[in-house]
Image (cartoon, helix red, strand yellow):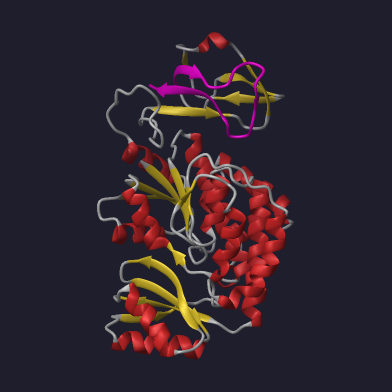
Amino acid sequence: MICFTYPGQGSQAAGMGSAWVDHPSWELVAEASEAAGRDVARLLLDSTDDELRHTRNSQLATFTVSMIALDAVTRVGIETAGHAGHSLGEYSALVAAGVVDFDDGVRLVAERGEAMQVAAEERNGTMAAVMGLDDDLVEQACEQADGEVWVANYNAPGQVVIAGSPPMVDAAGAIAKELGAKRIMALPVGGAFHTPFMASARERLQKAIDNTEFRVPDHPVYANVDATAHSSHGSWADLLCDQLTSPVRWRQSVHNMSYAGYTTFVELGPGAVLTGTVKRTAKDAKPLKVNTPADIDAIIEALAGPPVVASGPLEGEALFATERLVVSPSAGVFKPTDSRLTGAEVSAGQLMGHVGDTEVRTPWAGVIMGFLAVEGERVAASQPIAWLRTV
């Protein structure tokens, strides 16, 4: 089974949107800008690394790139059986799973980034990665430091992040070295995230969450707080608030996903942090990533396999490498040019129908295997219209 994963703050890089500008999925940037009331395109194209380190910028930018990558892989028919995101990435996972709609997701991420930025300015905090030490010994180091320092992220075996006041993080790091840690690495962040230092951010975010509608996910979403799959929508308001002041249990989530049968983890968004943690945590897993449009063909080839005889659809499996989906370019009522096109060979750019007044054209040449939308059906933007086999 395939799981889509979504990175958090720290994966951003200057110019990370440039590879996507000419891709159809770039249209999401205009929607994000409108929902956030900010120029998201400028963040993705023109911001410096220093500017992107600010929480209010990095979170919105990273979320948007993850949504672009998700839209891009969906357009070619790659599907998932589950979702999981690291910290900020949990919001990407919830939008991807349909728990929160895109505009609400943008607004929540923007508010979260602002709230965490303000909280970090109110309380001087920092974070450090402890390398090469078991989780329980890292916890012991924090307890022995006897101050404001806590475990913030369980990222992978031998990779745990601690956070708190700078003196206490230094003290816990020194104790961890005495207990056998190979390395203590200070992280270039401006706050002690996922600790009690974020209490004021939690209070502010709660107000935004209370005004958000949560829906049942299309597939399970693994939560940071408890590392378990959630197939309903009722607990997410509390989980998102708790996440701000609780450790991210990513290693435990990857273990639980692996035990549940997920074998392929596709990281959607900037960087490859989660791909690395999956390699260290689930040795038999296949970790893949989509940072740019150039990654998509490689992903299709990696996910392709011989035809499998089954009584129904294979949940979370990709289309074979020769198959593609034609998706709606906008929302509206679908009207095919000719419903008898099924089985016919079409050329790249051929008109397949209209959604409202907008043309639907196939980007690929191939044989139309079937329509997934019927005449008169109201479809959403990026909803599959037809599928074809390339020739």
The percent position of residue 258, horizontal first and vertical second, equals 33, 50
Residue 376 is one of the magenta-drawn residues: yes
Which residue does the image show at 43% across and 45% down from the upper left?
A: 294
The answer to whether any part of residue 268 appears in the image is no
The percent position of residue 265, horizontal first and vertical second, equals 37, 49
The answer to whether any part of residue 205 appears in the image is yes
- The one nearer the camera, 273 or 245, is 245
The percent position of residue 299, horizontal first and vertical second, equals 37, 42
Name above or below for residue 38 compared with residue 153.
above
Magenta-drawn segment = 366-391
Name above or below for residue 240 compared with residue 179.
above
State how many labels appear: 0
Q: Which image quadrant for residue 48? A: bottom right
Task: Say left or right for 366 vs 56.
Answer: left
Residue 165 is one of the magenta-drawn residues: no
- The one nearer the camera, 304 or 344, is 304
Query: Quick one: which residue is furthest to the front in this view?
Result: 234
Instruction: Name the image quarter holding the N terminus.
Output: top left
Name above or below for residue 157 compared with residue 106.
below
Which residue does the image show at 54% across and 77% down from the upper left?
A: 192
Name above or below for residue 300 compared with residue 137.
above
The percent position of residue 36, horizontal first and vertical second, equals 71, 55
Which residue does the image show at 63% across and 59% down from the upper left?
A: 109
Q: Which image quadrant for residue 185? A: bottom left
Which residue does the image show at 57% across and 24% down from the upper left?
A: 361
Query: Quick one: which residue is furthest to the top in this view?
Result: 340
Task: Say left or right for 231 vs 29.
Answer: left
- The one nearer the camera, 347 or 230, is 230
Instruction: Name the image quarter holding the C terminus.
Output: top left
